[in-house]
Image (spheres, rainbow, N blue to C red):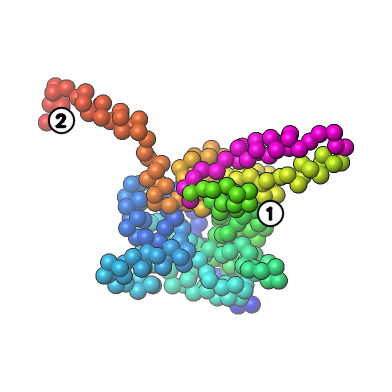
């Protein structure tokens, strides 16, 4: 295992919900930050590649290192940068490189580490957890990412992760695909609707069976993912676990697909929502607001307008 130096970690103290922007597009980051509502940034290699390719397509040239430095400078809150390694030693080495390169830019780097780097049943399941424990012990803050279950979130908190990122949208996708629901990426997914479907199907199947047979039928009918019926419900379960035991790990509701998801995790009391640029814009739009503005503007009398001249 690599010997880790001691770092001064980035520590943020909050008393309200934070909004991070989930993008590596500098134009989006700067514009959203200018609105006064962005507290941090989450990136990943795919988002960074997409952003750099966009620059190249426009004829601009910038190195990867300079581009990431610009992201760090664009906000004063946490900026999550992701490792690419699979084994704990690789993750730790890459985390050290990212932290040494970019944390001095604005002292706001957090290292994203997959909660589990296994890609098959034969792979080791605890490389991410081992790396998180080691990095946090060395003063490098981590964001445990790709979290799909409450159990994974519990492991992240036990390992001392600064942040945990449950992937709400991907959990929704998995549940819907399992029962053949067609959906668009931004479509809202309802846990309560899933439970009503399950109950209706159970009513049709249950007849004069014994209690044991009824139990088996209803158990096999469950259409959630181990008792989780939506990404928002996943976030709710993690919040309950963390509050029950006083874990300090902050919950970042990630893989957000629409404004309704943001509202629901805010109602739950999630620490942070990391939101794509288009969803942040969606949160501000309502036809009645536009209608009201048209009416207010039309009703301004000359005498009132003269007050501002």
Q: Relative to 191, does residue 73 appear above or below in the rendering?
A: below
Residue beneath the point at 17% across and 22% down:
301
> Would residue 267 be counted in the magenta stretch?
no
Q: Secondary structure at mark 1?
A: helix
Disc 2 packing (10 Å; few <14; some 14–19; many ≥20): few
What mark, if any, has residue 234 been given in the picture? none
Q: Please give left or right for residue 47 compared with residue 135 in the image.
A: left
Mark 1 — residue? 151
Q: Relative to 264, does residue 95 appear above or below in the rendering?
A: below
Of residues 69 and 224, the one nearer the viewer is 224
Residue beneath the point at 35% across and 51% down:
33
Residue beneath the point at 39% across and 72% down:
65
Counting residues from the start of the chain, the first of labels 1 and 2 encountered is 1
* Residue 154 occupies quadrant: bottom right
Residue segment shown in magenta = 185-211
Residue beneath the point at 79% across and 36% down:
206
> Would residue 197 be counted in the magenta stretch?
yes
Mark 2 — residue? 308
Q: CA distance from mark 1 to mark 2?
A: 59 Å
Disc 1 packing (10 Å; few <14; some 14–19; many ≥20): few
Q: Quadrant of the C terminus?
A: top left
Position in image of residue 80 (x %, y %) = 48, 61
Position in image of residue 244 (x %, y %) = 68, 44
Residue 269 visible in rendering: no
């Amino acid at each position: 295992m690599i010997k880790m130096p001691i770092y001064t970690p980035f520590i943020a103290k909050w008393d309200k919900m934070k909004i991070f922007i989930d993008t590596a597009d500098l134009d989006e980051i700067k514009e959203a930050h200018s609105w006064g509502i962005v507290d941090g940034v989450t990136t990943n290699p795919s988002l960074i590649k997409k952003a750099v390719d966009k620059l190249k397509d426009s004829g601009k040239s910038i190195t990867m290192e300079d581009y990431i430095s610009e992201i760090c400078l664009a906000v004063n809150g946490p900026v999550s940068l992701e490792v690419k390694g699979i084994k704990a030693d690789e993750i730790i080495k890459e985390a050290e490189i990212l932290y040494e390169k970019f944390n001095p830019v604005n002292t706001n780097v957090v290292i994203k580490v997959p909660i589990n780097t296994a890609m098959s049943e034969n792979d080791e399941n605890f490389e991410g957890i081992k790396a998180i424990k080691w990095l946090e012990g060395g003063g490098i803050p981590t964001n445990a990412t790709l979290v799909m279950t409450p159990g994974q979130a519990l492991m992240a908190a036990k390992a001392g992760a600064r942040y945990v990122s449950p992937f709400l949208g991907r959990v929704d996708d998995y549940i819907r695909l399992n029962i053949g629901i067609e959906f668009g990426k931004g479509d809202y997914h309802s846990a309560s609707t899933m439970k009503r479907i399950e109950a209706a199907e159970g009513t049709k199947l249950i007849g004069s069976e014994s209690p044991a047979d009824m139990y088996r039928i209803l158990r096999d009918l469950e259409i959630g993912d181990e008792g989780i019926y939506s990404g928002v419900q996943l976030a709710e379960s993690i919040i309950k676990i963390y509050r029950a035991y006083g874990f300090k790990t902050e919950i970042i509701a990630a893989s957000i697909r629409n404004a309704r998801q943001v509202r629901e995790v805010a109602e739950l009391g999630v620490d942070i929502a990391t939101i794509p640029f288009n969803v942040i814009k969606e949160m501000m739009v309502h036809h009645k607001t536009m209608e009201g503005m048209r009416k207010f503007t039309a009703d301004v009398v000359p005498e009132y307008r003269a007050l501002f001249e």
